[in-house]
């Protein structure tokens, strides 16, 4: 019988439920089980594709083309398994499915109700995800916190599953234990209230992951055990750490994996020591030589705060590549708008081993990014462009090398005298005209044929690759000949549609840009080839 683990949050969001789910999955996988993970978002949005990345964080894209929450990226990175569209659901997505089924008379004319029909749809999706991946254990993360009204239906679905399969369903609560500065004592009361909120939904947690600045002491563990009705061994300390990749090892120290298996009536299939993970963490801790990387973007400034969630896959891909070479990544956030207002500031890019221009949408900061790319090209600074970064690298080359002074993108201007070296894809034109934005971009994995003799061929070591996309605009093939004659190397092409996927510039330490998003496929123990070669060049250059 397939087993299910529900993970909910208490006190506040953003305390690491996604990392907890990913780490639990890694621990259970190391014990010989086939594991998958599901993310439930309480939003009415059908998917994450139309959400503001500053507010919601990065939009992660799966192989089968679903735009989903960034936690799905963590699941893939930790589990080293593909996550599919069935593994992601939102309130909007669930309701939409039920409404469409009702419209098609699939409920045979009966009255369709919020309860039990919405929870039943949630249960069907959870079971379908387990079946599709042939997983023995399915871990389900319920977004937000247990006290939020919008989570009630998802908690109800989990309660119904527990009622139907009491020996196969486990509940884990991830709760934060604050240490008020003026008091100086770790407080358990918020966690007690979170457990009571969960109890009010008919659910008793089996295990509590106690998130805090520091490790829990025995006094706090005992208090949580007494007031939250769990065994003391099931109160797991989850302190702040330097690297998220240390979390599975911390959980193993607390014997979390064995506690879960015992409660689910399972035994380890293999002797687990997480040796590969230990080696990774040791490398992270021991790395001394710094590689300084600048990311030129616009989705990280919110008031006086700098948030990194908008580019989390890019950040992790940089880290993976640095760890591969036993280097220590030092990532700096560079505002594209600053270079737009004062191009002279681009001189600071000389202080970096390498520069990344990631994906994005809209016109803000575009000219600043182009200035940064030009400076990298002219001053031999290793450069990696991703999606929009590839498009802007093409525009910069067209303007300043190929002599196409009015080169631009159809995304930025509709003036007749502009030369769109980047143009909207033909199949996207009607979608944009009809304002059909959600889930309509070129999404998911597509093949790319690598051109022999290129840096990309050296990186990948093979001719045909598959990478994930999220875009509406492409390099306009009308300008391809003149760009290539002027020195732009087309290093990768989609064989079905002859679309340019990778560009390079020769006689440069590293100047590569891809239309796809390589960061989505990078793994802690297997860095992505393009990021690996980029970091290699950045470390050598500086």
Image (cartoon, rainbow, N blue to C red):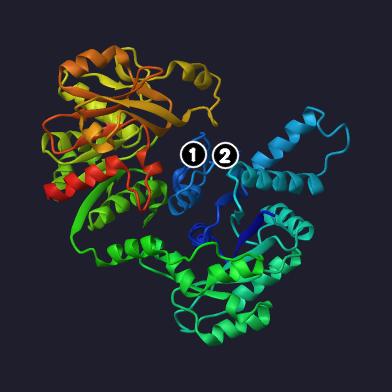
Q: Is residue 63 left or right of residue 368?
A: right
Task: Give the total of numbered labels.
Answer: 2
Viewer-closest of 370 and 319: 319
Q: Is residue 130 left or right of residue 184?
A: right
How far across and down, in percent of the image, does residue 489 sit?
Answer: 21, 24
Circles 1 and 2 in contact, beta carbons < 8 Å: yes
Q: Quadrant of the N terminus?
A: bottom right
Q: What separation in Å lies between label 1 and label 2 (alpha carbons)?
A: 7 Å
Using the rendered view, name the quadrant where residue 472 is placed: top left
Q: Secondary structure at mark 2?
A: helix
**What's the residue at 17%, 44% (across, down)?**
537
The residue pinned by badge 2 equals 85
Q: Residue furthest bottom?
A: 219
Q: Residue furthest front?
A: 270
**What's the residue at 65%, 57% (across, down)?**
4
How far across and down, in percent of the image, does residue 441 sit?
Answer: 48, 28
Q: Secondary structure at mark 1?
A: loop
Viewer-closest of 205 and 10: 205
Numbered mark located on residue 263 in the image = none
**What's the residue at 46%, 74% (across, down)?**
253
How far across and down, in percent of the image, does residue 374 sit?
Answer: 18, 33
Numbered mark located on residue 62 in the image = 1
How far across and down, in percent of the image, does residue 446 sit?
Answer: 43, 28
Determine if residue 541 is in view: yes
Binning the other alpha carbons within 10 Å of mark 2 as few (below 14), some (14 to 19) or many (20 upward) gives: some
Determine if residue 336 is in view: no
**What's the residue at 71%, 44% (across, down)?**
124
Using the rendered view, name the quadrant where residue 214 is placed: bottom left
Nearest to N terminus: mark 1 or mark 2: 1
Q: Is residue 480 above or below residue 170?
A: above
Q: Is residue 10 above or below residue 495?
A: below
Viewer-closest of 146 and 501: 501
């Amino acid at each position: 019988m397939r087993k299910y683990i529900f993970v909910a949050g208490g006190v506040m969001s953003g305390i690491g439920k996604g990392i907890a789910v990913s780490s639990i999955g890694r621990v259970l996988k190391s014990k010989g089980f086939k594991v998958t993970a599901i993310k439930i978002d309480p939003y009415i949005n059908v998917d994450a594709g139309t959400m503001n990345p500053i507010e919601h964080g990065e939009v992660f894209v799966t192989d089968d083309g679903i735009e989903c929450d960034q936690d799905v990226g963590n699941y893939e990175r930790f589990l080293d398994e593909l996550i599919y569209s069935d593994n992601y659901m939102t309130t909007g997505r669930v309701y939409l499915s039920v409404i469409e089924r009702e419209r098609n008379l699939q409920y045979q004319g009966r009255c369709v109700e919020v309860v039990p029909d919405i929870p039943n749809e949630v249960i069907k999706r959870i079971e379908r995800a387990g079946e599709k991946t042939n997983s023995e254990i399915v871990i389900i993360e319920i977004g937000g916190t247990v006290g939020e009204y919008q989570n009630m239906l998802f908690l109800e679905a989990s309660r119904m599953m527990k009622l139907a399969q009491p020996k196969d369903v486990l509940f884990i609560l991830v709760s934060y234990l604050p240490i008020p500065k003026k008091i100086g004592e770790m407080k358990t009361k918020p966690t007690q209230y979170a457990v009571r909120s969960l109890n009010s939904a008919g659910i008793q947690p089996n295990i509590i992951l106690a998130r805090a600045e520091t490790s829990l002491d025995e006094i706090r563990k005992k208090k949580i055990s007494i007031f939250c009705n769990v065994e003391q061994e099931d109160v797991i300390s989850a302190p702040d750490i330097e690297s998220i990749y240390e979390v599975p090892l911390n959980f193993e120290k607390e014997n979390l994996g064995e506690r879960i298996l015992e409660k689910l009536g399972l035994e380890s299939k293999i002797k687990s020591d997480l040796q590969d993970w230990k080696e990774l963490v040791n490398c992270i801790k021991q790395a001394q030589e710094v590689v300084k990387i600048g990311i030129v973007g616009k989705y990280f400034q919110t008031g006086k705060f700098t948030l990194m969630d908008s580019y989390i896959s890019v950040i992790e891909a940089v880290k993976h590549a640095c760890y591969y070479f036993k280097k220590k990544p030092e990532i700096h956030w560079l505002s594209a708008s600053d270079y737009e207002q004062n191009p002279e500031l681009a001189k600071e890019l000389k202080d970096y081993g390498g520069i990344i221009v990631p994906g994005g949408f809209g016109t803000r900061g575009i000219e600043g990014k182009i200035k940064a790319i030009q400076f990298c090209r002219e001053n031999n600074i290793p450069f990696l462009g991703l999606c929009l970064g590839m498009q802007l690298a093409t525009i910069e080359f067209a303007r300043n090398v190929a002599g196409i002074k009015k080169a631009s993108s159809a995304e930025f201007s509709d003036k007749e005298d502009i030369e769109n070296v980047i143009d909207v894809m033909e199949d996207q034109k009607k979608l944009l005209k009809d304002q059909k934005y959600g889930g309509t971009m070129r999404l998911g994995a597509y093949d790319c044929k690598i051109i022999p003799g290129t840096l990309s061929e050296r990186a990948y070591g093979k001719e045909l690759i598959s990478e994930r996309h999220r875009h509406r605009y492409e390099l306009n093939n009308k300008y391809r000949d003149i760009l290539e004659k002027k020195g732009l190397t087309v290093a990768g092409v989609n064989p079905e549609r002859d679309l340019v996927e990778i560009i390079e510039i020769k006689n440069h330490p590293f100047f590569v840009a891809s239309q796809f998003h390589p960061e989505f496929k990078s793994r802690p123990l297997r860095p992505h080839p393009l990021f690996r070669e980029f970091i290699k060049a950045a470390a050598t250059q500086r």
